[in-house]
Image: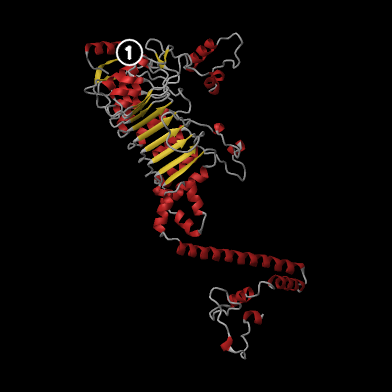
Amino acid sequence: MDTLLDPPPPPTGSPTSMAKRPCSSSPSQNPRPPPHFSQMDHLLHSFLSFPDSSLPISLDLSFDRLLDSSHSDADQSLLIDRAHNLGCLLLRAANRSARRRASLHNSAAWVLPPDLTIKVFSMLDSQSLCYAAATCSMFHKCAMDPLCYANIDLTTVVPKVNNAVVSTMIQRAGKSLQSLKLGIVPGPTGSPGPSQPLVYTIRNSVDVSSFSWNDKRTRQGKESSILTRSCLYPLSGDNGATGTLLRRLHLYNIERMDNASLCVALSACPSLLDLEIVGLHVELRQTLMSVSSNCHFIERLFFESSKTGRDDSLKSPTCFELVNNCPNISSLSLRGFKLHDYKVRILVKGFRKLKYADFSTSYSITGTFLRNLGNGSGGSLLEVLILRDCMHLREMEVARFLTAVLAGDFKFLKHLDISNREGLASEGDWYQRSYNSSFIPLKQVSEVRPDICLLAEFPSEGCFLDIDHIMDNDINSELGLPFQQSGHTSVGAMLTSSLESSYNSDQGSGNEEYQDSGFLIYEESSDEPLNALITGEEAFFLRIEAELKKGGRIV
């Protein structure tokens, strides 16, 4: 033991003049410990100074002799346990020292200072940031800065993210959180285009080989990979401080999200500027009420229904509240809802800064909200108007709108989409579809306003309803119709039956709510309500036609 603690000095008789100086790049064979070492330091130094070639054999023999010297099994077991513990302690100390040396090396080799490294990391997407944090201790320390989590994007194609991951990310961001994107998107992430629906379920995924539906249920020892209604609760943590500075919130196809949870999250985000909701099972009216009550600075609102054409919850008072409480909205997209013209007109006329409007697949819109819209204070700034696949959109209203464009209205309009996979509705009967209307001045608009991108894509006549599309949407099963048609059933009868049922036997535009609840009509010049209530849509339109013939202007 004395020999281990204090190894003998080199022989004094050896000629010191002939001793070679060890190379600095190679470790010395038997370095002498510094004089300030403790007894444990000397012991560990002597132990690690054994040559590698003889160390395994020497350890084995020494440990066997030590065990043989113990006469009881309890003593031998104690020695074995202490050897295990000592080995674990040495391994842990070696790993910690290796990481510290590597971190010092990386700090010396990495040319960027920590503040610039954090700036670079803040530009990475969330997955790349996690990869960088796992690289080394120095990168991990920089990646833990809250600024790196200011823009969190956890959207995936298949379920991979659960509530715990979202909570961890939001807690790391703290008050620096500015953007949060969650959910499942059908492909590469990005803002949806004019004709690109994002309503999606994981059952439609093309790459689900590694996903098991058993993962939807939380099992013991394994976290579920499905986001639930509580995934946004961390925004309300710390007395709502986390969501105070949030500017952007995008939620895609979170099947278990409900109105109550979404409203709680929106109440914690008073500075929200950009809200995008796609495929959530939430009601339009309640969501807009929550937005108008809590998000007064919002500028962009994108809402796509999970059940196209079924949500008829929006009421006129909600539209007025949204217009009054959120006057900064410049981009409004309400896709797939059963919107009526007078409600749409309240929104378009009310938002004085509106430049982008998208009401695609809104079945009840006929286009009457467009009348006298471009020469007043509301709607005149429109740059993009998308009315794609609005099944009740009338060809006469489209013609009137384009005539107003030719007359000089809508001077800022750059993009117009009136495409319809089932053609435009005729003036008298919407069952009569128009596929190539002769009185819609498409060519004239292209010549007079070449700066407008005009999309008017219609199917060939007689092919406006796709049978495969009906089957894909399970229209027959939802309506209780037999899937297999008898051999003598004509194709025309099947198309007529499907067409009637797909619109819930709504032969009009759905604007019959005019008859049930009156609403105020606004004069174009003054925006003040007229002292009259409209009790029927037909009478309303007839009065407008009479005024137009007299040269008057009325909304």
Q: In which quarter of the image is the C terminus?
A: top left
Callout 1 environment at 10 Å: few (<14), some (14 to 19), or many (20+)? some
Question: Foreground: 448 or 194?
Answer: 448
Q: Position of residue 439 (x, y in %)?
A: 34, 14
Residue on which the image places disc 1: 535
Tell me the colour scheme of the image: secondary structure
199 on left or right of 203: left
Q: In which quarter of the image is the N terminus?
A: bottom right
Which quadrant would residue 78 be assigned to in this image? bottom right
**Which residue is farthest bottom?**
13
Which quadrant would residue 203 be assigned to in this image? top right
The answer to whether any part of residue 464 appears in the image is yes
Q: Where is residue 519 in the image (x, y as percent from the top left)?
A: 31, 19
18 on left or right of 351: right
Q: Is residue 516 above or below residue 234?
A: above
Q: Position of residue 514 (x, y in %)?
A: 35, 16
Q: In this view, does 303 lie above or below 432?
A: below
| SS type, badge 1 | loop
Identified by mark 1, the residue type is: Thr
Residue drawn 66% across the image and 82% down it? 3
